[in-house]
């Protein structure tokens, strides 16, 4: 198992990522991130030879609008009452307004000459013909721009995509930047997209509402999960249907409702038995922003609470969250999650949590934060943890991604003061190109109980109980980064992880992940999916190999993930413990 020198070396590698400002732009490539019906604003250059608008930067707009084009006037046909811009013929009628950039009226078609810079806003009829409603022809800016709603998509090859705005083609490449308010998307990601996907509410219902949905069937097959070597196969199937409805009621006020219906079916031999059926409002919250540029927002209601690696949080919780981002890229957050409305069946039904965070979010790819999390537990256990932590995850360069999680656990557990700690750090190196190989090295440790006679302190680290421990390395699919089969809590545990992967263009990825597990302190208990009584004389918990296949954005609607895991028990497991295997398949159809 790695020595302290390895831990220090990994931390030293990642500290510059946390402390140094990121050189990257806040924007990401727009390739395969747009869909039919999106309203956009595109800047770029008109390529007269190819007859296409080459886009350098594109931004999504919140509301539908008429198409408009700003560029060089190619032709004027005064007799036919037409002008041509970007190879598009535009009719001019008696209702067309001619203006200067300042809004002053004046002029008509006879005022225009080829070679002038103009900005044309038009209406489009059912045949696709443009009729100008407004022509700005004086003091027009020197940059070319197109605005409007995407009416068609055409993929030329893996690295080029063409979108059309009412018949006007726009060419996107890997270098085309998607301009976003990355801070708003990071803080309020559910309003922009389901996490890990691109299915933001996009189907318009009236003036204020947007709808999206998905169907997600998933299945798991586990063999050997009792470790006995007997016939103990378990198959679980879980189909689910989700609907998300976002409301934009003006700049200060937005809402989101996210409803999911799911059922769970289990088979241990012949046929499937229905064990659970549930209709749940996973999210139902409102966002209220302070007016003007005061840089603060209040989010109230049930909402998905998560961090970048789901090491602290990945749960739908009732809560009140205040963000202060006037000082961006530094954001201050104060959140309170009461147990008042939590279902009695949930493990957190007796927890009241206060979270205070200072977050540094310089761009859409990097975030560093310090936090304090305090819990009051009204259950008889009386576990009152307090976490002090430092977190970083991001991509400081185009080929290097990394993370650092460091936490101190204080507070009380059954009246015993807690003095525990945890560290999780790692880095992924990825090559550039159409096929992108990647290598990952990571190490995680959660302290264990020392069990010294007379010691009044508890040294066993426990995660928050809201964690999911799920992320990705170099590929497209999330997986359990401490192991798909063992899936342990980082408690009295050391995990050394080696990963290698291949990413094929923007669609397919394959990851292989190898884990080595040891106890931090000798104990007879393991906190994880496999929880046998351990042999406390040996620290070796075993090894696991996981293979993960990810496919995304098939026809911009379908994605799936497949994982295979094989766990080999170590000497700390009971004698004659057998290998455990797992197959997991998840498919998603978005609409």
Image: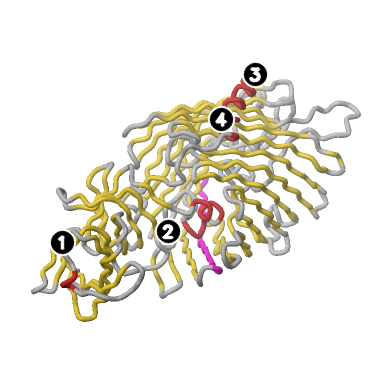
Is residue 266 highlighted in magenta?
yes
Question: Spatial distance from mark 1 to mark 4, Cα to Cα?
Answer: 59 Å
Is residue 51 highlighted in magenta?
no
Quadrant housing residue 289:
bottom right
Please name the residue that numbered disc 2 is placed on. Answer: 214
* Residue appearing at x 20%, y 52% in the figure: 52
Please name the residue that numbered disc 4 is placed on. Answer: 426
Q: Nearer the viewer, residue 180 or 435?
A: 180
- The percent position of residue 521, horizontal first and vertical second, equals 74, 26
Q: Which of 194 and 243 is in front in this view?
A: 194
Work out whether mark 4 precedes mark 2 in sequence or the reverse, and give the earlier one. 2
Please name the residue that numbered disc 1 is placed on. Answer: 114
Q: What stretch is highlighted in magenta?
A: 252-268
Work out whether mark 3 precedes mark 2 in sequence or the reverse, and give the earlier one. 3
* Residue appearing at x 61%, y 62% in the figure: 294
Please name the residue that numbered disc 3 is placed on. Answer: 5
Neighbor class of circle 3 (other Cα within 10 Å; few <14, some 14-19, many 20+) is: few
Question: Spatial distance from mark 1 to mark 2, Cα to Cα?
Answer: 49 Å
- The percent position of residue 533, horizontal first and vertical second, equals 70, 32
Quadrant housing residue 504:
top left
Instruction: Label 3, secondary structure: give it.
Output: helix
Q: Which of 454 and 323 is in front in this view?
A: 323
Q: Which quarter of the figure is the N terminus placed in?
A: top right
- The percent position of residue 558, horizontal first and vertical second, equals 36, 51
Question: Spatial distance from mark 4 to mark 2, Cα to Cα?
Answer: 33 Å
């Amino acid at each position: 198992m790695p020595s302290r020198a390895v831990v220090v070396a990994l931390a030293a590698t990642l500290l510059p990522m946390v402390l140094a400002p990121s050189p990257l732009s806040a924007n990401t490539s727009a390739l395969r991130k747009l869909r039919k019906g999106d309203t956009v604003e595109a800047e770029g250059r008109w390529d007269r030879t190819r007859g296409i608008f080459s886009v350098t930067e594109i931004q999504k707009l919140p509301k539908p609008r008429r198409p408009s084009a700003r560029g060089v006037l190619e032709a004027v046909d005064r007799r036919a009452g037409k002008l041509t811009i970007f190879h598009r013929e535009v009719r001019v009628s008696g209702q067309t307004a001619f203006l200067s950039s300042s809004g002053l009226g004046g002029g008509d078609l006879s005022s225009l000459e080829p070679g002038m810079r103009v900005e044309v806003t038009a209406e489009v009829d059912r045949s696709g013909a443009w009729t100008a409603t407004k022509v700005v022809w004086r003091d027009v800016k020197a940059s070319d721009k197109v605005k409007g709603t995407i009416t068609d998509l055409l993929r030329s090859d893996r690295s080029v995509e063409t979108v059309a705005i009412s018949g006007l083609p726009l060419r996107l490449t890997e270098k085309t930047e998607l301009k976003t308010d990355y801070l708003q998307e990071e803080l309020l990601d559910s309003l922009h997209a389901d996490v890990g996907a691109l299915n933001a509410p996009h189907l318009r219902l009236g003036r204020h509402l947007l709808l999206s949905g998905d169907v997600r069937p998933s299945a798991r097959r586990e063999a050997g999960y009792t470790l006995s070597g007997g016939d103990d196969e378990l198959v679980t199937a879980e189909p689910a249907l989700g609907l998300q409805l976002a409301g934009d009621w003006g700049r200060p006020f937005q809402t989101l409702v996210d409803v999911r219906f799911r059922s769970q079916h289990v088979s241990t031999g012949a046929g499937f038995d229905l064990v659970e059926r549930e209709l749940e409002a996973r999210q139902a919250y409102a966002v209220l922003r302070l007016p003007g540029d005061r840089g603060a927002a209040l989010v109230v209601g049930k909402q998905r609470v998560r961090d970048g690696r789901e090491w602290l949080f990945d749960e739908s919780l009732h809560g009140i969250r205040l963000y202060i981002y006037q000082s961006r890229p530094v954001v201050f957050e104060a959140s309170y999650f009461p147990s008042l409305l939590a279902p009695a069946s949930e493990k957190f039904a007796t927890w009241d949590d206060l979270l205070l965070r200072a977050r540094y979010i310089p761009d859409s790819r990097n975030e560093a934060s310090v936090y304090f999390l305090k819990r009051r537990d009204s259950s008889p256990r009386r576990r009152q943890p307090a976490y002090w932590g430092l977190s970083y995850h991001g991509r400081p360069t185009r080929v290097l991604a990394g993370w650092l999680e460091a936490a101190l656990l204080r507070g009380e557990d059954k009246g015993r003061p807690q003095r525990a700690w945890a560290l999780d750090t790692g880095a992924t190196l990825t090559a550039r190109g159409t096929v992108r190989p990647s290598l990952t090295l990571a190490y995680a440790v959660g302290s264990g109980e020392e069990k010294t006679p007379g010691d009044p302190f508890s040294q066993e680290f426990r995660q928050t109980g809201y964690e999911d421990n799920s992320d990705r390395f170099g590929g497209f699919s999330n997986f359990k980064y401490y192991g798909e089969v063992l899936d342990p809590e980082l408690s009295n545990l050391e995990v050394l992880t080696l990963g290698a992967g291949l990413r094929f263009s923007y669609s397919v990825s394959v990851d292989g992940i190898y884990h080595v597990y040891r106890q931090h302190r000798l104990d007879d208990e393991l906190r994880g999916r496999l929880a046998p009584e351990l042999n406390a004389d040996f620290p070796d918990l075993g090894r696991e190999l996981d293979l993960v296949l990810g496919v995304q954005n098939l026809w911009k609607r379908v994605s799936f993930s497949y994982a295979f895991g094989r766990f080999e028990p170590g000497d700390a497991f009971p004698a004659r413990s057998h290998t455990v295997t797992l197959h997991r398949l998840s498919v998603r159809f978005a609409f």
